[in-house]
Amino acid sequence: MQAQINGITLAFNDQGTGLPIIFLHAFPLNRTMWAKQEEALSTQFRVITIDLRGHGESDAPLWHYSLDQAADDVRGLLDYLSIRQAIFVGLSMGGYMLFAFYRKYAEYVKGLVLADTKAQADTDEGKQARFEMAQVAYTRGPSAIADIMVPKLLSPATIQTRPELVQRVRTMIEGNQVSGIAGDLMAMAARADSLPLLNQITCPTQIIVGDLDLPTPPSDAKLMADQIPNVHLAIIPGAAHLSNLEQPGLFNETVRSFVEMALSKQSLGIADATSSNQF
Ligand code: MLT
């Protein structure tokens, strides 16, 4: 499906009925990374997956990108779909966008799932690495970005034994335009430090992290869990950065239980407690 939002075309899927769950993908992928979540959860909930500006089938204008602008795009799509409140799931860059979204539009957020992401801003070295990656995208194209990203996104075991999953991830990366890749690198480099936001996140929050995640390791997840008041932490074994793709069963059950718990506690008017879950 497509909608005209903030002057560009945004592509999205909208499946199922009930409480909306909005899925925001990682860099530099697209909404098809959520196929297994869509399949499993749309039997019970309304599942909306979005190609963020610059990715997949959405427009990738050659211009300035920011996470606030991505938050405005998501808000625009929610208004287009007449959705007033939802659960939001963001993985890595999708999580960075959720911090921006929460800052601007907390009233839309019934619950947050922050997967394989972190609250800290980029260091100076991190910003320099983004600049260098943008030059690689410009001079050698998206397949050179796939060469760099695949070993960061997937575990060594997956790379060795699951060639079809590796190829799926490569295809998602290679399907992006350079303007979108460079735009999101700029947006991530300029993002705010979200550590001061954490203790102001009052909605129920689920943190998920693969135990083998290198870009955003379990220590980053624990740092967030220590500061968000109403939080659950799940560490998923045998998964690296793309925990939803490497361990979809565990990922889906974590999201399903969280959403059911958030709904039942809300209907009973019970405040939540912090807990942690290691599978
Ligand atoms: C992602 O998976 O979205 C990226 O690894 C995030 C990042 O580069 O910081």
Image (cartoon, rainbow, N blue to C red):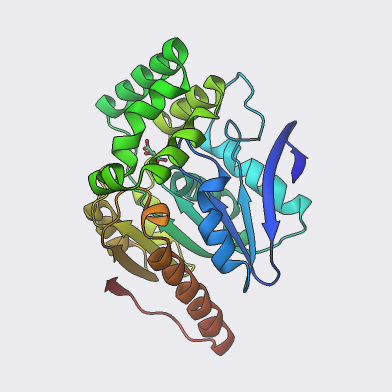
Is 267 above or below relative to 87? below
Answer with left or right where residue 177 lies relative to residue 152.
right
Q: Position of residue 99 (x, y in %)?
A: 47, 49
Q: Position of residue 174 (x, y in %)?
A: 50, 28
Q: Is residue 229 visible?
A: yes
Q: Position of residue 31 (x, y in %)?
A: 57, 46
| Ligand 1 falls in quadrant | top left
Q: Nearer the viewer, residue 81 or 213?
A: 213
Quadrant location of the C terminus in the rendered image: bottom left
Q: Is residue 102 visible?
A: no
Is 241 above or below relative to 185? below
Q: Position of residue 21 (x, y in %)?
A: 59, 62
Is 272 above or below relative to 219? below
Residue that appears at 41% across and 64% down = 251
Number of marks present in the image shown: 0
In the image, farthest residue toward the bottom: 268
Name the quadrant containing residue 39: bottom right
Residue that appears at 52% across and 60% down = 37
Residue that appears at 37% across and 68% down = 229
In the image, farthest residue toward the top: 139
Is 210 above or below relative to 191? below
Residue that appears at 61% across and 34% down = 53
